[in-house]
């Protein structure tokens, strides 16, 4: 198979040569031919061995003839069976997780771990299966980009934003800016911890690992917001904007490990680096110009048809094309998928796009998460269970404390809202697994750290729905005028105290004419509301 080429018109010279070897063994005299003396038993074993080779050779030749015939439909039955196994495992374990009150992600990961090579080993063509499941990561990240675009497209109108900025001190700060600052503080704190603890080899490794751990899943936060029933509140809109801004950082985060790894393998120079930077700028500019036109053309084509299959196919082709171009430019498939959603920022068709790809995302996304579970080794998780549990508790508490204290101390958010936001962001995004896999493949993260962070990320995603209880408090405590969250009796006591300090004890008789700021705010000017808010 290595030394001979096989052609469709002949069986090749090797089969004829094997026939000669068999004939020599059967009829020649070993002594007269000068060969080593062989017993009859040894001759028989050699002849059987050569016959087996000849049968395998004929089978290989027939197989190559079949695969080279374009008129024959070729099917890889083993890959088909592996796909069926993966789909069944994802559905069964996903249903079990939902019945137990867990998110389906937990079932997908557990199902993949059970059928993977480290446990039951029910999948043979692992590489081909994981390649197919890669479509799931493309559509999951594409939806994350769409979620970012939808969050910043369907925000409050400008008059509403101006009114709220005048009535609440927390609205003085743009949620996007707050999200960027919170993420920067998280990353900086994580870099210090990872670099000083010796978990990484260089500052670049510490930055990549810290950003991966600091970014949370916007899809998970959105699901928890809807589950908590606060989707229409002001707090939910702020939290969505704070988390969605992190999707912007996913594009460079997914592209940098691949780009640096390529430059290191090719011994790239400064000019090679600048070439990639210029290519990225041109790709971004072309995407901004091309993406809306593609979506508009798909919408026009759908309006002329009775069904929407062409629209869905066009959106899928658009997402795959953006991911492929990004991979060809050495920016990774995943970075192109996120960018494909983000560049549709001002498109009015984002809800329609999300609805059209939902079935595809559900199927391939479940398969992708199940294939990620195949990486996890049950034996490794059991042996390192204590370390993994400590890592889960540390990351959850670390992110909750840093986010809550930053929002409460620097941006005047109420304590209950700060804790609720911190708990919602105390998980790690699924895309971080892709980033860490790329970093580990290029040697930026050692293997043990990578294997420890995989189950840690999975457990944090499983525990993410616990934040719904704190998010529900925001709905009951939200005020129509967006004043800080505070019980009424505390608000009145604080106001009476400030009133006494300002007007003196002799003016206590005027307290009876005082009206609560919550009772008659519609008679007050925005400046008066702002002063009352600051005094509280």
Image (tube, grey):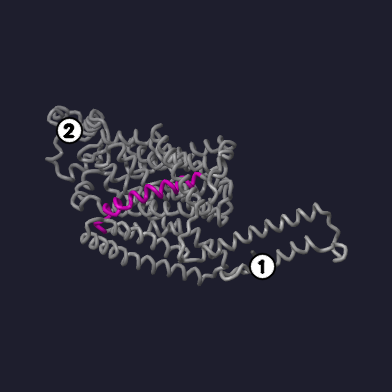
Residue bearing the label numbered 2: 516
Where, by quadrant of the figure, is residue 338 drawn? bottom left
Q: Nearer the viewer, mark 2 or mark 1?
A: 1
Q: In front: 426, or 342?
A: 342
Q: In front: 70, or 393?
A: 70
- Residue 387 picture location, percent across and down: 56, 37
Please tell me which residue is depicted at 17% across the width and 45% down the height of the picture: 526
Please tell me which residue is depicted at 56% across the width and 43% down the height of the picture: 121
**Distance from the alpha carbon under mark 2 to that under mark 1:** 92 Å
- Residue 345 picture location, percent across and down: 29, 58
Q: In front: 24, or 217?
A: 24
Residue bearing the label numbered 1: 3
**What span is colored magenta in the figure?**
347-373
Q: In front: 285, or 196?
A: 285
Where, by quadrant of the figure, is residue 475 drawn? top left
Whether residue 368 appears in magenta in the rendering, the answer is yes
């Amino acid at each position: 198979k290595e030394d001979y080429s096989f052609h469709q018109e002949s069986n090749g010279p090797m089969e004829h040569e094997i026939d000669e070897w068999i004939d020599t063994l059967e009829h020649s005299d070993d002594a007269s031919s000068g060969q080593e003396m062989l017993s009859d038993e040894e001759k028989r074993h050699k002849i059987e061995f050569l016959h087996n080779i000849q049968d395998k050779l004929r089978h290989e030749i027939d197989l190559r003839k079949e695969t080279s015939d374009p008129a024959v439909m070729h099917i890889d039955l083993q890959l088909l069976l592996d796909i069926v196994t993966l789909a069944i495992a994802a559905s069964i374990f996903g249903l079990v997780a939902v019945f137990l009150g867990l998110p389906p992600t937990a079932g997908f990961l557990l199902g993949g771990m059970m059928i993977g090579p480290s446990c039951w080993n029910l999948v043979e063509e692992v590489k081909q299966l994981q390649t197919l499941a890669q479509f799931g990561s493309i559509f999951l990240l594409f939806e994350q980009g769409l979620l970012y675009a939808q969050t910043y497209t369907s925000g409050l109108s400008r008059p509403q934003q101006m009114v709220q900025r005048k009535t609440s001190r927390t609205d003085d700060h743009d949620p996007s800016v707050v999200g960027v600052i919170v993420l920067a503080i998280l990353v900086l704190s994580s870099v210090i911890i990872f670099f000083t603890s010796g978990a990484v080899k260089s500052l670049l490794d510490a930055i990549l690992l810290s950003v991966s751990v600091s970014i949370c899943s916007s899809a998970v936060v959105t699901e928890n917001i809807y589950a908590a029933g606060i989707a229409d509140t002001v707090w939910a809109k702020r939290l969505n904007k704070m988390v969605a801004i992190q999707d912007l950082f996913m594009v460079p985060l997914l592209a940098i490990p691949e780009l640096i790894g390529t430059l290191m393998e090719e011994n790239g120079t400064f000019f090679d680096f600048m070439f990639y930077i210029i290519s990225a700028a041109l790709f971004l500019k072309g995407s901004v110009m091309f993406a809306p036109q593609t979506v508009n053309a798909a919408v026009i084509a759908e309006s002329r048809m009775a069904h929407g299959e062409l629209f869905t196919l066009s959106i899928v082709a658009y997402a795959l094309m953006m991911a492929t171009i990004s991979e060809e430019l050495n920016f990774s498939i995943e970075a192109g998928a996120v960018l494909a959603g983000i560049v549709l920022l001002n498109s009015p068709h984002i809800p329609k796009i999300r609805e059209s790809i939902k079935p595809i995302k559900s199927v391939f996304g479940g398969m992708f998460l199940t294939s990620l579970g195949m990486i996890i080794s049950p034996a490794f998780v059991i042996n390192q269970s204590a370390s993994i549990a400590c890592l889960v508790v540390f990351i959850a508490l670390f992110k909750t404390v840093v986010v809550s204290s930053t929002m409460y101390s620097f941006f005047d958010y109420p304590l209950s809202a700060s804790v609720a936001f911190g708990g919602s962001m105390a998980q790690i995004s699924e895309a971080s697994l892709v980033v860490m896999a790329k970093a580990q493949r290029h040697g930026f993260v050692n293997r043990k750290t990578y294997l420890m962070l995989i189950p840690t990320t999975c457990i944090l995603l499983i525990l993410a729905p616990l934040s719904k209880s704190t998010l529900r408090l925001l709905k009951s405590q939200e005020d129509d005028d967006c004043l800080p969250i505070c019980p009424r009796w505390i608000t009145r006591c604080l106001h009476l105290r400030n009133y006494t300090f300002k007007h003196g004890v002799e003016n206590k008789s005027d307290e009876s004419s005082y009206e609560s700021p919550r009772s008659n705010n519609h008679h007050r000017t925005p400046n008066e509301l702002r002063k009352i808010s600051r005094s509280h």
